[in-house]
Amino acid sequence: METKKNLKTCKNGHQFLKSSDCPTCPICEEERKPKDSFLSLLGAPARRALERENIKTLEDLAKWTEKEIINLHGMGPSTISKLKKALSEYHLSFKS
């Protein structure tokens, strides 16, 4: 069964197809995706979850426990492994 997609237009005038009520414009999300930080490794839901908590750097992230991060809406196991790898590359880790 194929899901019906609806044509939507965001506040910036981008048109896109969505099968859900989610108002997030994929074009705007791609434009605001960081190009050169660990946040660029993450999908939009996980990135937004960290941004909501004002986590902008790996040093910010290291102030949180793994459990606190996994409990944020938008986080999943694959994201946690990416975050652990990014932290370890800078000799950092989640707070104990």
Image (spheres, rainbow, N blue to C red):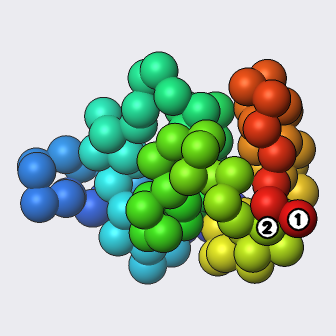
Which quarter of the figure is the N terminus placed in?
bottom right
Q: In which quarter of the image is residue 83?
A: top right
Q: Position of residue 50 (x, y in %)?
A: 54, 60
Q: How far apart are marks 1 and 2 (CA)?
A: 6 Å
Q: In this view, does 50 lie to the left or right of 85?
A: left
Label 1 crowding class (10 Å Cα cut-off): few <14, some 14-19, many 20+?
Answer: few
Residue 53: where, in percent of width, then height?
Answer: 48, 69
Q: Is residue 31 above or below residue 71?
A: above
Q: In the image, what residue occupies the spot 79% across and 67% down?
A: 65
Q: Which residue is drawn at 70% across and 65% down?
A: 64
Residue 19 seen in the figure: no
Q: Mark 2 points at which residue?
A: 65
Q: How many marks?
A: 2
Amino acid type, label 2 = Thr
Question: Which residue has dot 1 on it?
Answer: 96
Query: On the image, which quarter does residue 2 sit in?
Result: bottom right
* Residue 38, horizontal then vertical, whole percent: 59, 33
**Label drawn at residue 41:** none
Amino acid on which the number 1 mark rests in the picture: Ser
Instruction: Identify the residue shown where x is 43% and y is 23%.
Output: 35
User: Is residue 37 or residue 23 the one in the foreground?
Assistant: 37
